[in-house]
Amino acid sequence: MEQRPMTQYFLTLPHDTACEPTMESLQDLDPAELEAVMAAVEKFNTDLNEAGAFVTAGGLEPSSTAITVETTSAGPARTPEPFVKADQYVGGFWIIEAADQEAALVWAEQCSAALQSRIEVRALQSAPE
């Protein structure tokens, strides 16, 4: 029986531009609440690893720290701002492997429950054949 290749999915955590949460600002949360969220995320990451679904994950600094680079025939330009202005931005992410979109959505539901936040799910493009 031929095994179908796993698809990688990008799970993203939105953050609000108005408050730009950081690891430092998390210290302002109720310690018990912060501990509960951190434990839930740790369990989610452990479950991903044990299932062989974890590829990588990370948190991003606020969009106000972004520098957009663009190189044209005139040469490179560096603009100290995000490439798009928005009320929300990607604050963290996971790349996971799942058999199909439904399996990725189940993981995203668990992630959403752990963080008490919305999670966006998008498949990474497959390499051209």
Image: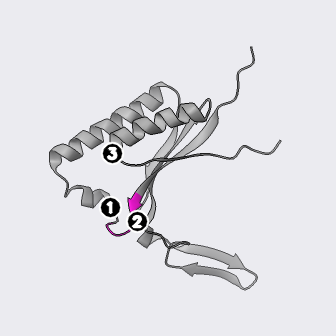
Quarter assignment of residue 75: bottom right
The mark that comes first in sequence, 3 or 2, is 2
First to last magenta residue range: 15-19
Q: Check contact, mark 3 vs mark 2: CB within 8 A.
A: no
Quadrant of the image containing the N terminus: top right
Q: Which residue is mark 3?
A: 116
Task: Tell me the number on the disc at residue 62.
Answer: 2
Q: Is residue 102 left or right of residue 35?
A: right
Three-letter code for the amino acid on which mark 2 is drawn: Pro
Quadrant of the image containing the C terminus: top right
Q: Check contact, mark 3 vs mark 1: CB within 8 A.
A: no
Q: What is the distance, in whole Å, between disc 1 and disc 2 at their CAs? A: 7 Å
Residue 85 % position (x, y): 50, 73
Please tell me whether mark 1 sits on a helix, a strand or a loop.
Answer: loop
Q: Is residue 23 left or right of residue 51?
A: left
Residue projecting furthest to the top? 1
Q: Main secondary structure of the magenta part?
A: loop
Residue projecting furthest to the right? 129
Q: Check contact, mark 1 vs mark 2: CB within 8 A.
A: yes
Three-letter code for the amino acid on which mark 1 is drawn: Pro
Task: Tell me the number on the disc at residue 32.
Answer: none
- The residue at 55%/31% (across/down) is 103
Q: What is the distance, in whole Å, between disc 3 and disc 2 at their CAs? A: 19 Å
> Is 5 contained in the magenta span?
no
Q: How many marks?
A: 3
Please tell me whether mark 3 sits on a helix, a strand or a loop.
Answer: loop
Residue 19 % position (x, y): 31, 67
- The residue at 68%/77% (across/down) is 71
Three-letter code for the amino acid on which mark 3 is drawn: Gln
